[in-house]
Each structure stands twice: as structure tokens, then as C-alpha cells.
Amino acid sequence: MTNDDIQKIIFDALAMANNGREADSQIPLSTETQLYGTGGHLDSMGLVSFLVDIEESLQDSGIYISLSDERAMSQQNSPFRDVQSLSGFIVQLIGEN
Amino acid sequence: MIAHFLDIMRKNPEHEALVSSQFSVNYRELLERYEQYRSWIARNRIPSGAVVSFDGDYSPNSVSLLLALASNKNIVVPLSNDSRNHFSEFREIAATEYDISLDGSEAKLQPTGRNADHPLYEQLRGRDSAGLVLFSSGSTGKSKGIVQDLEKLMQKFRIPRKPMRMLIFLQLDHIGGINSLLYSLANQGTVIVSDKRTPSSVCKAIQEYKAELLPTSPTFLNLLMLSRAHEEYDLSSLNLITYGTEPMQESTLQKIAKILPDTELHQTYGLSEVGILRSKSRSTDSLWLKVGGEEFTTKVVNNTLWIKSDSAMLGYLNAPNPFDEEGFLDTGDLVDQDGEWIKILGRASEIINVGGYKVYPAEVESVLLDMPDIDDVVVFGEDHPIIGKIVAAKFKLAASKTHKQLKAEMLGFCKDKLQSYKIPGKIYITDDETYNERYKRMRRKEKI
């Protein structure tokens, strides 16, 4: 799975989340998009659903990893800060899988 | 009882009462607004004993209106913006006679033409007490209206306690929010309101307004650590964190104790039906607690906690009386017991606790069943490491759809019908029957 594939999965999950959001609060699909934390577009519930979507898309490609685990929570820099950090986190988890 | 509150508020008029990025008022200003609402109520001829709703979150207006309605002996139905989608349902159940909207600068009054003659209301009017109506979701999906004697709730604040600068986390239509507000008013405290209830917004308000007390939920503490907002802001003013509304994970408690070593952690226990119990944690990182206080008696029957309380509700507006013959109420919470100490294990029933919010499967199912091409759907909880439980739904479809199509449709369909925490985060499509031989829905995960 290439970095582009992972980024597409993240964008697809953002697009999915946008289905449940009003027209004036759509999340932009960009590598710069802030996800969770200060300035982030997602609240806690939004983050949880978003991570589930990504996990499911990865499963469709035969990759079984959990993004919302204790480890992610205890990392120095939250991997859920923005699209880029999340993408790096997924690459790392797949590498270890 | 209202008079007692007003006396205390008058004692130190220049003391800050309520502060946020939008407003800052002292007790003198709050009392002035209270008097203005008293006159407004008189001008509009809202009679004592009338059932009156108002919508809005914490603000100088909502707090002074609440007090003015209480002093007019009204039965008050506070509605917070969190439950905006349910306003008309809640007003219907409460049979409100007047609806007040605080949206905008002026209060707008709407007489409804209803006649609220429920026997519980008559009981309140008979004893010349102000009332309070709160809502909890019913197991059949319909919200239950809980009638409280507001003055009895206020009684327990007669004993002076420490004034605190408290960040209010739960809204005015939650027993925890009402309890926090009354505590603060009765003790010359300061209520701090954050712009949002996200970790960074709450931490920012703690830093800016030097909050000493944060009443919150275990899930919020989990999210706080996840967002690492505590590293961006100075939380050194925080002396005490109280947590309740759902079972606390031991690991979360230990982590937060490590991150905030100078902050005391204290578990609380309460229910809309009986109020908030005074409780004592065995130690700051222990889940064992003693509940009770002068006005509460507890018993454990079949590992389930039962509570009897002076400040218990009068009853439900739209559900049977849940008290036993001795006046105890089944909390539905499973507990472990060690002498006088108890440990809350979780709900006995199938309620899904999503980050401290209770979700009743039937309510979500009834919305999802209105979607096109759905044969049946069952809703249940799945474990989730961040928020405890996530709502999951298993669909039986009438027409073929991909997983992604169905999810996109469901999100769009639910966005104005359910609060976000009730919308399933995980969905499944099945060809199997979704009910058992007795035509009872199977809400068990292993059937997937």
C-alpha cells in the first residue's frame, strides 16, 4: 500500500464524515487539514467514527490494524493532529504489522 | 429556599458569579437581572405553578431567569442546545404552558394553550414548591420526564461549603449541571463556562479563569489525555476533578493522577431521579467509594444499587412509579461491595454508554427504520478504547447497497434527527434474521 493509497483512504473517510455535516461545516480534503485537537475539525465523536471508517477501508485491503488504541493515546505527539501525522502513523503501524 | 439562596448572593455583591469569553457578571449584576426577570414575569402574568420551559445554555440570562421562575414557584423545564432536536418532544411530554426562548437579546414568551394538570404537578402546587423537569431516555426510546421538587434539591445546599471557581461541564438540563450551579450560587462561588466542551476549550478556560474545580466524566479525561491539551495550558489552579456519569477505567484514573499529581480526584454518583449523592473516594486513585450523606440511604440487592433519598423525584410524567414499597429506587447499576465501600461496575441493562451519554438502542433503531430500503435494524454497543462504547447497527436491507453507500445515506439521514453520539459509528449488513424466535431483537455482537 503506497502513501497515496493511504491518503486516499483518509480523504474518503473525511468525505464520508462530510455526509453527516451541514454545508457550512464541511471538512476540506487536504494534507494540511487539522483533524483533532486545537484547531481541529473533528470533535471526539467525529474522531471516533472517522477512525472506524479508516480501519474498515484498510480491512477491505486486507490490512487489520487498530488506530484507536492505548498506544496512540500515549504517544508524545498525537497522531490524530492532522492528515499528515495520521498518514505517517498508519504507515508505521502497517510496517510493524 | 429561594430566599436563602438570594440572601447568600447578596452578601458579597462584587464577587464574580459567572464568567466566560462572552460575559462576566458579579452577584450584584446577576441579582439585578433576576429582578428584571421577576418584573418581566409579573408583566407577562405568568402565574405561579405554571409549567414553563426555556431554552439556552449557561449565561447570566438563563441563570437569573431560572432563579426568577423558581421564586415565582413555577415548574421549570430547562432545555439546553445539546438536545435541540428534542425540544418539541420534551415540551410535549412536560405539557409546558409557556415556552421562553432566550436566543437573541430579549426573552420571547410563547403561551402554548396547554393545561398542565398532571397529578405530580398538582402535588408541587399543593405544597407551594417550585419544580424542575429533567429528561432521561426511556428504554422504549421515548424520553422520560422526571419531576423534581426544586426547593428540596436546594435544601441540601443550606450547609455552607467551600466557595470554588468551578468550570461547569454539564448543562442546565442535566442533574449534574443543576447540582453544580446550585452549589456555586449557595456558596458564593464562581461559575466558569468554556466556549465549547472540547479538551482544548475547557483547558483554555481553566487557565484563563483559574478554575479550581472541574466536574467531568471519565471519557472527557481520556480525551483530554489523548488531545494533550493539558500540555498546552496551565492547569495548576485545578485543585479538584470530580468524575461521574459512567464507570471509570482504572488505567485512565491512574494516568490522570500521574499527569496532574497536585489535583485531587473524586468520584461522584448521581441520577436524575434521586439527585447527586455526596460521596467519598477511598483514595484519589481508587474506584471504591462511599455514597450517601445525611439525606440518602442505599442498599444493594442482587449486586444492584438501590437508593432512597429525601430529594428524590416525585415521579415520572410518562412512566410508571419506579420506587419499591420502602421508597427505594433501582438504579440499574451493578456494583461490587466491600463493607461500606462500593465500586460501580456498569449498567445492568443493554444501554450503550457512549462517553458518558446513555444511548437506548430502541430510540436509534426507530430513526434508522425510517430510512428507505431498510427491512430491519438492530442497534447495540461495541467496546471502544477511547470512548468506552461505540454505537453499532446491523442492517437487513430490502435493496442491495454497498457498505459505503449505506453509511453515507445513514449519516445524511440522521444528522438532523439524532444527537451525534447516538448515530452509529459502525455498521454491518446482514442477511440473517435480526430477531429471535420470540420476535425479540437480538442486540448481541456475536450474532454478526
Image (tube, helix red, strand yellow):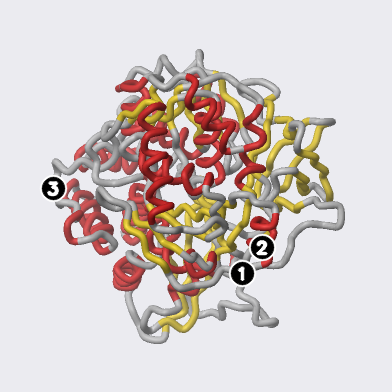
Q: Residue at left 38%, top 54%? A: B43
Which chain contains the residue that carries disc 3? A
The answer to the question of whether label 3 and label 2 lie on touching residues, with beta carbons closer than 8 A, is no
Vertical comparison of B444 with B438: above or below: above
User: In the image, are marks 2 and 1 on the same chain?
Assistant: yes
Percent x, y of residue B10: 48, 25
Which chain contains the residue that carries disc 2? B
Within 10 angstroms of label 3, few (less than 14), some, or many (20 or more) residues?
some
Q: If the image is split into quadrants, where does the N terminus of chain B sit?
A: top right
| Amino acid carrying mark 3 in the image | Ser
Q: CA distance from mark 2 to mark 1?
A: 7 Å
Vertical comparison of B295 with B235: above or below: below
Vertical comparison of B158 with B323: above or below: above
Residue designated by label 3: A30
Residue B425 seen from this side: no
Residue designated by label 2: B122
Q: CA distance from mark 3 to mark 2?
A: 59 Å
Q: Residue at left 48%, top 62%? A: B392
Closer to the camera in the image, B155 or B290: B155
Q: Does B159 sit left or right of A77 as displayed?
A: right
Q: Does B195 sit left or right of B238 as displayed?
A: left
Comparing marks 3 and 1, which lies closer to the viewer? Answer: 1
Residue designated by label 1: B117
Comparing marks 3 and 2, which lies closer to the viewer? Answer: 2
Closer to the camera in the image, B31 or B262: B31
Percent x, y of residue A34: 20, 40
Label 2, secondary structure: give it: helix
The answer to the question of whether label 2 and label 1 lie on touching residues, with beta carbons closer than 8 A, is yes
Say which label, 2 or 1, has the lower sequence index.
1
Closer to the camera in the image, A80 or A96: A80
